[in-house]
Amino acid sequence: MDSIVVTGNGPLQGEIPVAGAKNACLALMPATLLSDAPLTLTNAPRLSDIRTMTALLESLGAEVAALQGGQVLALSSHALDSQRADYDIVRKMRASILVLGPLLARYGHAEVSLPGGCAIGARPVDLHLRALEAMGAEMDLRDGYVHARAPGGLRGAIFEFPLVSVGATENVLMAATLARGTTVLKNAAREPEIVDLAQCLRRMGAQIEGEGTSTITIDGVDTLGGATHPVVADRIELGTFMLAPAIAGGSVECLGGRMDLVQSFADKLAETGVEVVQTERGLRVTRTGDRVRAANVVTEPFPGFPTDLQAQFMALMCTADGTAVLEERIFENRFMHAPELTRMGARIEVHGGTAKVTGVARLRGAPVMATDLRASVSLILAGLAAEGETVLSRVYHLDRGYERIEEKLRGCGARIERVKG
Ligand code: UD1
């Protein structure tokens, strides 16, 4: 198995291009299931999660061509021959559940394996199912599968999510585009990935209003057409790269970065003493002082501080001046990176959903293990600020969500290499 070796070697200088958003792309790809006409996604990221979604769509009979080295995905569902998403693929990636809404809306039935457990908590799909039930679907959970039927077709409904869910909002948003009548989703997720999906669906002919607010209204139409849509920039990759100069010092311009995608995160960085400016080409992040100041964080749905940047921010706090309290409110059990960071000399105490991090002047390189996608990149960031060598194993977690990360960080002076194993 491959590993990644990082050697801390001081300030970074240069630029890093930000790819299209993994999470947006994983919701946009299943939108092909809603229409006979081709859907083309540009600015797609080249990641193993995208290949997993490709395999899932192909298993249903969709055609997915990765063009221009994978940056363009040409999708077509004109010859779909299955409405069953098998456990073998679904178990690899939770976002697979996003085929349920589109299949049900277009064919009136679908069988999708339940995603099962996940390293960062229980992560159920009850909200996806309840919202679709409100639209007239009948759900039967048997043999580890959701057997969903909507014999007379889905119908519009008013549904208020009891808690904000990105995936459930996306699933139901897609389903509602082909339902009979009007659907109103209340307490909907407001993430940029939802806005991106709504924009793409509108290009396909859907009638949607209110995306980006907590109430989304969808007027169902009979059929949807084709579209070409550019995937929005990845705000989590952006935030991760913004942390590289924050933790190692120096100045890096994140090309394609947009302040509106990371406002609360950028505000938090400013609180630590790091400068973030919008430039013509992206966001420039500069740390001039020796050490950043500690700052407390509470993770929240967008526009709050994203849970997907909590691990990386913790890495920064490990070397901050003072003590920071990080409260994780979206997922239970999302501090698996804490014991690994501790191996590098960090001082972290975890109590339930709260981590208290007391900064140390210097971290030390160590062999560490990736436990999930964002946890693994937090260890790379810590390695940039550590004395000596940090060797990260189980890097397949990293490859799910970061495209050419070694190359991108090397481009601004980091010493980082992948060792084939
Ligand atoms: C998406 C992102 C993930 C991010 C998360 C929160 C994708 C592919 N993944 O995940 O990177 O960390 O948003 O920003 O876009 N919940 C339920 N029942 C449900 C659905 C969710 O209880 O049916 C709970 C979850 O356990 C969690 C919370 O709701 O505690 C938020 O989860 P959700 O927003 O649905 O996350 P995902 O869409 O899975």
Image (cartoon, rainbow, N blue to C red):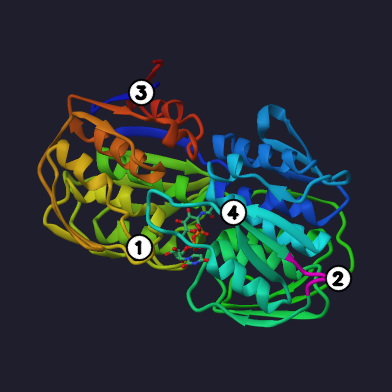
Which of pointers 2 and 1 lies earlier in the amino acid sequence? 2
Which mark, by number, is residue 221? 2
Residue marked by disc 3 = 3
For label 1, the SS is helix
> Which quadrant would the C terminus be assigned to in this image?
top left
Callout in the foreground (2, 1): 2
Q: Give whichever of 162, 278 is nearer the camera.
A: 162
Q: CA distance from mark 3 to mark 1?
A: 34 Å
Residue 133 percent across, percent down from the top left: 67, 74
Residue 221 shown in magenta: no
**Magenta-drawn segment:** 149-154
Q: Residues within 10 Å of mark 2 (few under 14, many from 20)?
A: some
Residue type at tag 1:
Asp
- Answer yes or no: do the residues labelled 2 and 4 have beta carbons within 8 Å? no
Please tell me which residue is depicted at 68% across the width and 60% down the height of the picture: 147
Choose top left, top right, bottom left or bottom right for residue 241: top left
Residue 151 shown in magenta: yes
Residue type at tag 3:
Ser
Residue 212 percent across, percent down from the top left: 59, 70
In the image, is the residue at mark 4 within 8 Å of ligand 1 by its beta carbon? no
Residue marked by disc 1 = 267
Residue 213 percent across, percent down from the top left: 58, 75
Choose top left, top right, bottom left or bottom right for residue 329: bottom left
Q: Residues within 10 Å of mark 1 (few under 14, many from 20)?
A: some
Callout in the foreground (3, 4): 4
Q: CA distance from mark 3 to mark 4?
A: 37 Å
Residue 272 percent across, percent down from the top left: 24, 57
Vertical side of 395 occupied by 100: above or below: below
Vertical side of 416 occupied by 243: above or below: below
Please tell me which residue is depicted at 58% across the width and 65% down the height of the picture: 168
Residue marked by disc 4 = 143
Residue type at tag 2:
Val
